[in-house]
Image: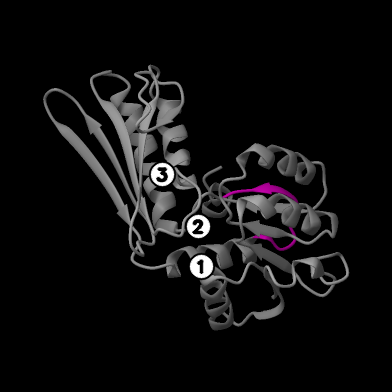
């Protein structure tokens, strides 16, 4: 598999290492120094693109790949306001877009576990959910895309909640999210369900970026030959 890496920061380097370990080749590397070189011509010799950049550039990067009919795996978060447009473009038959807020296999199992638990807790209405996410100081968006995904999953199962709020904002009908930025933490997510009688806590703690990188490469392998909008649920055979 010939890969274009769009974004060559820490995640880009991790993805490169995993891809090479799995027998793939890196045919094109795009970063902020040569972003003008991302075009249909430069993508002509690649099988798939993996995009981890910034919220400001993600949409145009993704659309460039789709217009070139190059499957693209996007791991950039913070550009949800434009995602529906890119998703619609892909679903109209214009290439494949694989998007996830988190590519860790463990995190996606964490999503499933919270969905199941919240569906059971909805029968009691006694438990109040809250989310805390901790990331390195260089992460620009807050809350994390993973925390937002968790909130949406839980909200869909709990009938007395509608959306999420970022602390210190408090809304009794919204799931509170606390975003902490410290050190070089690759990503920790804590979901708490609290009642007057007891408390249930789920935690996912990433040990390094390697798990995210492996998931992104698996997503790239999965995207070859497919069309439309793809997710980790597609990869895991859930949807």
What's the residue at 58%, 56% (across, down)? 75
What's the residue at 50%, 48% (across, down)? 141
- Contact (CB < 8 A) between labels 2 and 1? yes
Q: In the image, 219: left or right of 92?
A: left
**Horizontal and vertical percent for residue 39?**
84, 65
Q: Is residue 176 above or below residue 186?
A: above
Q: Which residue is mark 3?
A: 111
Q: Is residue 22 above or below residue 120?
A: below
Q: Check disc 1 and report its element: helix, strand or loop.
A: helix
Q: Nearer the viewer, residue 25 or 34?
A: 34
**Horizontal and vertical percent for residue 168?**
34, 31
- Contact (CB < 8 A) between labels 3 and 1? no
Quarter of the picture holding the N terminus: bottom right
Q: Which segment did they paint magenta? A: 223-231
Q: Nearer the viewer, residue 155 or 58?
A: 58
Q: Is residue 88 above or below residue 218?
A: above
> For mark 3, does the 10 Å Cα neighbourhood hold few (<14), some (14 to 19), or many (20 or more) residues?
some
CA gap between label 3 and label 1 equals 18 Å
Please say whether residue 188 is one of the residues in the magenta stretch. no
Q: In the image, 235: left or right of 43?
A: left
Which of disc 1 and disc 2 is earlier in sequence? 2
Quarter of the picture holding the C terminus: top right
Q: Which residue is mark 2?
A: 103
What's the residue at 50%, 52% (across, down)? 140
What's the residue at 49%, 46% (across, down)? 145
CA gap between label 3 and label 2 equals 12 Å
Q: Which residue is mark 1?
A: 213
């Amino acid at each position: 598999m010939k890969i274009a890496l769009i974004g060559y920061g820490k995640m880009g380097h991790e993805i490169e290492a995993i891809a090479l370990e799995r027998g793939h080749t890196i045919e094109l590397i795009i970063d902020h120094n040569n972003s003008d070189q991302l075009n249909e011509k430069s993508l002509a010799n690649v099988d798939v693109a993996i995009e981890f950049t910034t919220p400001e550039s993600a949409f145009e990067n993704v659309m460039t790949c789709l217009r070139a009919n190059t499957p693209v795996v996007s791991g950039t978060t913070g550009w949800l306001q434009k995602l529906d447009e890119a998703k619609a473009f892909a679903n109209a038959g214009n290439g494949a877009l694989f998007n996830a807020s988190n590519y860790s296999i463990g995190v996606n199992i964490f999503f499933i576990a919270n969905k199941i638990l919240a569906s059971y807790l909805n029968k009691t209405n006694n438990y109040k959910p809250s989310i805390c996410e901790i990331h390195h100081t260089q992460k620009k968006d807050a809350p994390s895309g993973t925390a937002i995904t968790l909130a949406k999953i839980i909200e869909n199962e709990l009938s007395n909640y509608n959306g999420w709020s970022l602390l210190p904002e408090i809304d009794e009908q919204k799931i509170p999210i606390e975003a902490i930025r410290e050190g070089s933490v690759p990503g920790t997510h804590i979901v708490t369900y609290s009642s007057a009688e007891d408390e249930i806590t789920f935690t996912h703690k990433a040990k390094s970026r390697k798990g995210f990188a492996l998931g992104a490469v698996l997503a790239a392998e999965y995207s070859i030959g497919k069309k439309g909008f793809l997710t980790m649920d597609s990869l895991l055979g859930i949807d």
